[in-house]
Image (cartoon, rainbow, N blue to C red):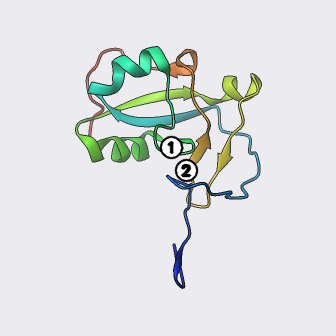
Amino acid sequence: TIEGPRIRAAQGHTVEVDLGLPAATPPPYLYHGTVARHLDSIRVEGLRPMSRHDVHLSPDRETAIRVGARRGRPVVLTVDAAAMHRDGHVFHVSANGVWLTKSVPPRYLGFPSSSEPAPA
């Protein structure tokens, strides 16, 4: 959001920002929208923040489809957030409902049964 001469980052993208978000207990499952060309590396490395400070996760499949569609035909991955939380991974939720975590190892990811894109 824009506040005077400054822009407030909702999730802290590419600059170091302390959002002051408390740790939060996630729902059992969260979702990540991507495209098929990234699946091979995600299967090996999991989800990484890349140029951001956190991995962004959606609370529902519909939102993840919209996010993935920004880069092409969307593929939605399911994140076992409950298992991650039990294993000590920390989650935060931004004011606009985006869930944030440092990374998602591959063992917590559910991939579509094939590389077929999610229905739009």
Q: Position of residue 109 (x, y in %)?
A: 51, 21
**Location of residue 49 in the rendering, given as x and y in whole percent from the top left corner:** 51, 37
Q: Is residue 112 left or right of residue 83?
A: left
> Which residue is at a point 41% across and 42% down the rendered structure image?
64
Side (left or right) of 73 relative to 86: left
Q: Would residue 73 appear left or right of 42 to someone viewing this image?
A: left
The mark tally for this picture is 2
User: In the displayed image of the protein, which residue is found farthest to the bottom?
Assistant: 4
Assess disc 2: are there few (<14), some (14-19) or many (≥20) residues with their C-alpha within 10 Å of its C-alpha: some
Mark 1: which secondary structure?
loop
Q: Element at badge 2?
A: loop
* Dots 1, 2 in contact, CB < 8 A: yes
Q: Kindly indicate the quadrant of the structure image that contains residue 108.
A: top right
Is residue 112 visible in the rendered image? The answer is: no
For residue 58, the mark is 1
Q: What's the amino acid at mark 1?
A: Ser
Camera-side residue: 100 or 48? 48
In the picture, the disc for residue 105 is none
- The residue that appears at 35% across and 17% down in the rendered structure is 40
Residue extending farthest to the left is 72
Crowd band around label 1 with a 10 angstrom C-alpha radius: few (<14), some (14–19), many (20+) = many
State the residue position of label 2: 98
Q: Which quadrant holds residue 119?
A: top left
Using the image as rendered, state which of residue 93 and residue 3 is in the foreground. Answer: 3
- When the figure is inspected, residue 15 is found, relative to residue 106, above or below; the finding is below
Is residue 73 visible from the viewing direction of this image? yes
Gap between marks 1 and 2 measured at Cα: 6 Å
